[in-house]
Image (spheres, grey):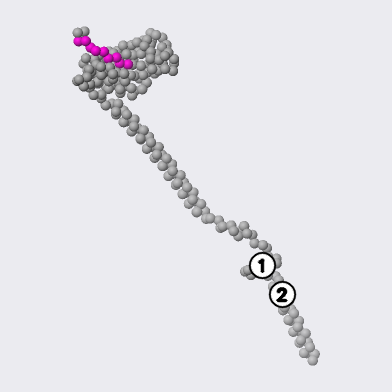
Amino acid sequence: AFVVWATAIFAVGYVGLAGGWALWSLEGSPPVAQAGTAPMPGTPPADPVAAAAPAPAPQSADLAAQTAQRIANAQAAASAAQAKLQSTEARLARVEQQLASAAQPIPAPAATEDCVTALARLAHGARVTFPLGAVQPANPTDLAGVAQFARAATSCPAARVIVEGHTDSTGDETLNLQISWDRADNTIAWLQAQGIDTGQFSAMGFGARLPLSEGDSDSADSDRRVEFRVIRHDPATD
């Protein structure tokens, strides 16, 4: 009987020790929340910002984006440069067309028209202007019209052309007279350099005696000029 009693006491103690060890093991493990259930006590709450944040993009993706942007910028700059070049070429083409039109010789007056009268009419469009104190033209394109007029004059033997040089009223009168003569002489010399016969042309300087302006400085530019006067030649005076 003593043996049976001792054995029972030992069995009860062993069972209690095993149950206590199992309970200690469960309490020492972190609680596990099942899906769809509230978090177990003692579990720290999840961070919603960290959970929603996307994973950082690889560095290679940033490099590809930068490269694509640089290529797009380069293409835009190339397109702008091409447009500017086309605009410049168009402007040059218009200038060349204008110069080509100006270089075309004026046809000689018809035989039924008085060539002296027709030449005098053309003379109004042939005028050369000069900078202050200069004896070379301010606008070289003016000389293209002068050349056209001079070629037409060679087709009218009955005409004589006086190349009249003028100045504004600025400065010394004697110096202005010399400048006006130089402007007329230089114009004839330029025509000769173009291969035009200037036997019908003669120079004359008037200084500031025949102004076109009203005397104010703003319109004085028109006074510094060379004009052409057409007269009829009388063979009896030869």
Q: Name the residue under label 2.
A: 23
State which quadrant residue 156 falls in: top left
**Which residue type carries mark 2?**
Leu
Report which quarter residue 55 is drawn in.
bottom right
Figure check: 27 above or below 8: above
Q: Is mark 1 on a helix, strand or loop?
A: loop
- Read off the residue under disc 1: 38
Label 2 or label 1, whichever comes before in sequence order = 2
Picture coordinates of residue 142, whole percent (x, y): 33, 22
Q: Can residue 189 be seen here?
A: no
Circle 2 sits in a helix, a strand or a loop, which is it?
Answer: helix
Q: In this view, does 47 lie above or below 19?
A: above
Residue at point 36%, 19% (across, down): 129
Q: Position of residue 10 (x, y in %)?
A: 76, 84
- Determine whether 24 is above or below 97 in the image: below
The quadrant in which residue 88 appears is: top left
Please tell me whether mark 2 or mark 1 is closer to you in this view. Answer: 1
| Rendered residue at 40%/13% (across/down) | 168
Question: Horizontal placement of 56 versus 45: left or right?
Answer: left
Q: What stretch is highlighted in magenta?
A: 227-235
Type of amino acid under label 1: Ala
